Image: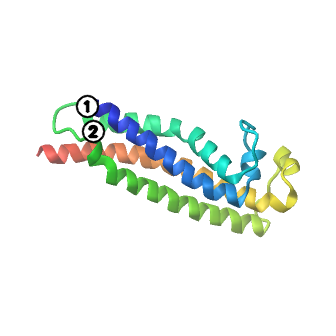
Amino acid sequence: MRFLSIIVMSVLAAVIYGIVHDQITARICVEYFTIGHARLIDSDSPTLLGFFWGIVATWWVGLPLGFGLAVAARCGRPPKLQARDLVQPLIRLLVVMFVLAAIAGTIGFVTSSSGMIRLVGPLAELVPAERHVAFLTCGWAHSASYLAGLVGGVVLWIVTWRRRGKLAV
C-alpha cells in the first residue's frame, strides 16, 4: 500500500499541476486547445478546457513518475521512505516546472512577437494570424513543462535513492 500511495500521490500532483497550468494557458490561447489538440470535448470555455486537458494530458505523466519514485523510495533494503517523505521534493519539482514553463513561455512570446519564430504548416492556416504569438507562447510553456517534468522526475528518482543511502549510514 505504501508503494501504491506514492504512485497515487504523484498522479494527483501531476493532475493538479496540469489543471493549474492549463487554466493559465487556456486563457492565453484557447486555440492551443481547440485547434492544436484533438477536439475531445465540445467546448470553447477556457475553464472547461483547462480542467479537461489538465487531467487528460498529465495523469499519464504522473504514473511513471510515481512508479519510479516508489521504486526509489521503497525497493531494496531499509530505510524506506513513505509518501509523506516525498511531498516537499515533489512540490519543489512542480515549482521548478512552473518557473521553467513561465520562462519558456516568455521566450516563446518574445521570439514569436519579434518574428524570429513563426507558426508554420497546417496550424498556421488553422490558427487565426492574430493568435499565432499566443499559440506559440503556450506551445513553449507546455513543452518546457513536459521536458522539465521528465528531467526533474529522473533527478528526483536519483535524489530519493541517494537520500535512502545517506539515511542508512
Q: What element carries label 1?
A: loop
Above or below, comparing residue 41 to residue 86 in the picture: above
Above or below, comparing residue 140 to residue 6 in the picture: below
Question: Which residue corresponds to the image point at 35% horizontal and 42% vertical from the top-left?
Answer: 157
Above or below, comparing residue 155 to residue 62 in the picture: below
Which residue bears the numbered disc 2? 73
The kind of residue tagged 2 is: Ala
| Mark linked to residue 75 | 1
**73 and 118: which one is in front?**
73
Q: Quadrant of the N terminus?
A: top left
Q: Position of residue 148 (x, y in %)?
A: 50, 51
Question: Which residue corresponds to the image point at 75% horizontal and 44% vertical from the top-left?
Answer: 43
Question: Which residue corresponds to the image point at 80% horizontal and 58% vertical from the top-left?
Answer: 132
- How far apart are the two marked residues, 2 and 1, measured between alpha carbons? 6 Å
Question: Which residue corresponds to the image point at 25% horizontal and 31% vertical from the top-left?
Answer: 75
User: Coloured how?
Assistant: rainbow
Q: Where is residue 118 in the image (x, y as percent from the top left)?
A: 79, 58
**91 and 120: which one is in front?**
91
